[in-house]
Image (cartoon, rainbow, N blue to C red):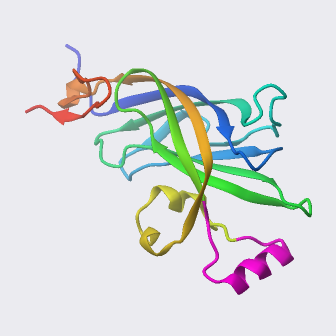
Amino acid sequence: MASAASVFLLNVTGQIESAKFPEFDELYCKYCFVYGHDWAPTSGVEEGISQIASKNRHIKEEIVWNFPIEITFKSTNPFGWPQIVVSVYGPDVFGNDIVRGYGAVHLPFTPGRHKKTIPVFVPESSSKLQKFTSWFTGRRAEFTDPKVVAQGDGREVTRVRSQGFLTLSFNVVTKDLKKLGYANTSSDPSNPAMTTHP
């Protein structure tokens, strides 16, 4: 007799496909995952850094990385469902690498193929003097830990500016969610939901 499942698995493969930054070129990105206390990665890579990519001569706005991501998590509880945080970097006029944007999105809840376009933003200095000083010294406002982007604490006091968009694609496989009483299917594919069953 098979024993009941004590954990469920979430496997995600995919890629950080591209970015649209009208004002910038020669960019690379870093990614990491943020997840709740009940979650643990069992295989794959938790963080990575891409190659530097330039804008296509024919599609002037788009920077293409096609940078692969692959990870498997186990958990007993959907609370703290993993998010991927992406930070984009590029050179300023002095050649220093500075942050060009942060973005975060939850990994999809439902199995299958998903494509997400997410806005990216940068923190702003709170005064004109700070702005000038940071430009002059080459030290722009940035988060010491990019994972703060996926958390709510202190975000309401952070001044940010929108910079562009990232496109990510995901292939999602789940295992044993139903055995633990969770259903992650939806009749409306544009609005997936997770519900518990007694």
- Residue 81, above or below 101: above
Residue 33 in view here = no
User: Could you tell me which quadrant the C terminus lies in?
Assistant: top left
**Which is more toward the observer, 2 or 147?**
147
Q: Which residues are magenta?
A: 122-140
Report the residue at 32% width, 28% height from top.
190
> In terms of depth relative to the viewer, which is nearer, 150 or 131?
131
Quarter assignment of residue 183:
top left
Residue 5, image x and y in percent? 26, 27
Residue 24 higher or lower than 151, as above or below: above
Residue at 52 percent of width and 42 percent of height: 118
Reply yes or no: does residue 134 show up in magenta. yes
**Relative to 3, 90 lies left or right:** right
Q: Position of residue 163 (x, y in %)?
A: 63, 53
Location of the N terminus by quadrant is top left
Q: Is residue 53 above or below residue 22?
A: above
Q: Is residue 186 left or right of residue 31?
A: left
Residue 124 seen in the figure: yes
The residue at the point 37 percent across, 24 percent down is 174
Q: Nearer the viewer, residue 91 or 84?
A: 91
Tell how many labels. Answer: 0
User: Is residue 113 a member of the stretch shown in magenta?
Assistant: no
Q: Position of residue 66 (x, y in %)?
A: 69, 28
Please indicate whether residue 99 sits to the left or right of residue 11 in the image. right
Image position of 153 (left or right of 28): left
Instruction: Give the answer, above or below, for where 198 lies relative to 89.
Output: above
Nearer to me, 127 or 44: 127
Residue at the right extreme?
94
What x and y, as percent, mark residue 33?
53, 46
